[in-house]
Amino acid sequence: MKPARFDYYAPGSPEETVTLLAELGDEAKIIAGGQSLVPMLALRLAVFDHLVDLRRLDALRGIDTHAGAVRIGAGTTHAAVGASAEVRRAVPLLHRATPLIGHFQIRNRGTIGGAIAHADAAGEYPVVALTLDAEIEALSPRGRRTIAAADFFTGMWTTALEPDEMLTAITFETWEGRCGFAIEEFARRAGDFAMAGAAVAIRLDGDSRIERCAIGLFGLGPTPVRARDAEAGLLGCPATSVTAGEVGASATAQLTGIPADVHGSADYRRRVGATMVARAWHRAMEEASND
Ligand code: FAD
């Protein structure tokens, strides 16, 4: 199928872009890499009268490191994120998540801002943003604001962004100290969206107790979710006192709204999710313990 007819705009600055979005109203949509939007338009799952392309906005591209954090422009492609030595060093979880996204053609065009704004509950970047408590910057005609990842993903493919707001950058704090990070997912075919997955970040103190940890789950609800109760129960525990299997079971015990379809029931997905948490916990703990 072909998309319905639309008018096309390619503004030259971020400010011009959000002014245009405000003028055009609800029938306008941003297009970045087009890797999610174009298939939806082509299948007529979405119809917009106006597409506002970000391709001329060089200001939205690039990766900057400053004061214990990495700021990534919304228009930076998945491929550029994956190739960045700074991301690899300072935000290993983001680096490790990148090759799991689709195929290299998709990573060459898709952007981190697009992936986070699209907010697919099974997407890798949304869950990494949530797990690492990323800060999401947005611009509108009313000015700039920062949204915590915990407040950003509000429902299935729905975010805290207003219709005239553009995501401009995502900032990830660098975890310092004895840390380990891992992301694990199960997909029916390589490159497919995950049926269930988990991202884990752990920091140990000098006595090898769990000083900080974060467990993010994806593909297991309408949004990516944090297993906050499980995290709270792990803080202060000696690294050797918890088994990965226990962590997997407790992280998935209270999940609600797990999807079910021909590929698997909600109960099956919960069990797969528990295994993904256990695998990610094991790998992250191994890395932190050897740090
Ligand atoms: P677009 O498709 O251009 O836009 C997506 C949405 O985000 C639109 O609603 C658009 O309006 C909005 N948007 C884009 N940029 C901004 C911005 N700066 N501010 C506000 N709103 C914005 N993704 C995964 O995470 N994991 C996968 O395994 C995966 N597999 C895929 C497999 C296939 C075959 C395909 C086609 C895609 C797959 N994707 C996967 C999706 C891919 O990662 C997309 O690139 C990404 O979700 C959207 O990025 P984009 O730049 O292409 O955004």
Image (tube, helix red, strand yellow):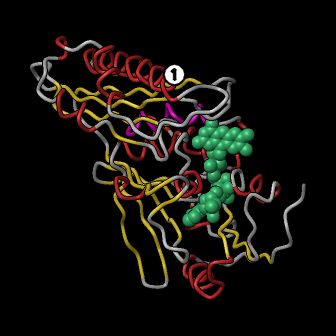
Q: Position of residue 15 (x, y in %)?
A: 54, 81
Q: Position of residue 135 (x, y in %)?
A: 36, 57
Q: Residue at coordinates 37% horizontally, 54% vertically from top-left? A: 149
Instruction: Tell whether 244 sits left or right of 266.
Output: left
Q: Residue at coordinates 41% horizontally, 32% vertically from top-left? A: 199
Q: Residue at coordinates 33% horizontally, 13% vertically from top-left? A: 245
**Which quadrant holds residue 55?**
bottom right
The answer to whether any part of residue 107 appears in the image is no
**Which quadrant holds residue 280?**
top left
- Kindly report the secondary structure that dominates the magenta region of the rendered protein: helix
Q: Which residue is mark 1?
A: 268
Amino acid type of the residue tagged 1 in the rendering: Tyr
Q: Is the CB–ligand 1 distance for label 1 below 8 Å?
A: no
Total count of labels: 1
Region in magenta: 89-101
**Closer-to-camera residue (235/251):** 251
Secondary element under disc 1, as helix, strand or loop, is helix
Give the answer, above or below, for where 184 lies relative to 101. Answer: above
